[in-house]
Amino acid sequence: MHTSIGISDAVPVLSCTQALEFLMPCQSYLLGLGGINPSCCVGAQSLAAAAVSPTDRKSVCQCLKQVATLARVDEDYAKQLPQLCNIDVPIPLQLNINCDAIMVNDVSFKMNQYKNLED
């Protein structure tokens, strides 16, 4: 007999360190020190693709929220990242976000399509 664990019972597969590695190319942009670049968007899109389970999404949200506060990420730049990298995130990206409110299937993306990279 084959049994499976429900998605809501899953342990996060994506670690905080892995999530941060995806976004490392975005560091200067998120700190307000430089412009956005294609490798940043590839990393952000890859993170969106990797965070597939509700457990992963919640875990990544909590990680990024904590790191963004400690690193003094520019919240305005963080809010622009999904649009600039063509990632649909139906929740506002803000430091006071409630990570428990993230819906199960609400993040989608279109790979290799960048907007406003030349700006």
Image (tube, rainbow, N blue to C red):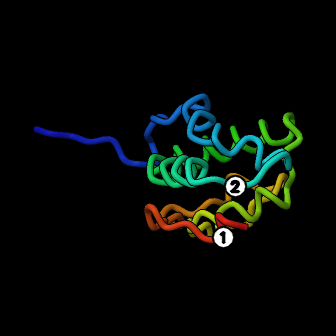
Category of crowding for the residue at label 2, using alpha-carbon neighbours closer than 10 angstroms: few (below 14), some (14–19), many (at least 20): many
Give how far across and how far down residue 63 sits, in percent: 69, 38
Q: Given the image, on which type of amino acid does mark 1 rest?
A: Asn
Q: Residue furthest left?
A: 1
Q: Nearer the viewer, residue 37 or 5?
A: 37
| Circle 2/circle 1 CB separation < 8 Å | yes
Q: Nearer the viewer, residue 79 or 65?
A: 79
In the picture of the structure, the residue carrying the numbered disc 1 is 116
**Which residue occupies 61% across, 32% down?**
16
Residue 48 falls left or right of residue 74: left
Element type where label 2 sits in the image: loop
Residue 73 falls left or right of residue 118: right
Give how far across and how far down residue 26 sits, in percent: 68, 45
Among the 4 quarters of the image, the one containing residue 15: top right
In the picture of the structure, the residue carrying the numbered disc 2 is 36
Element type where label 1 sits in the image: loop
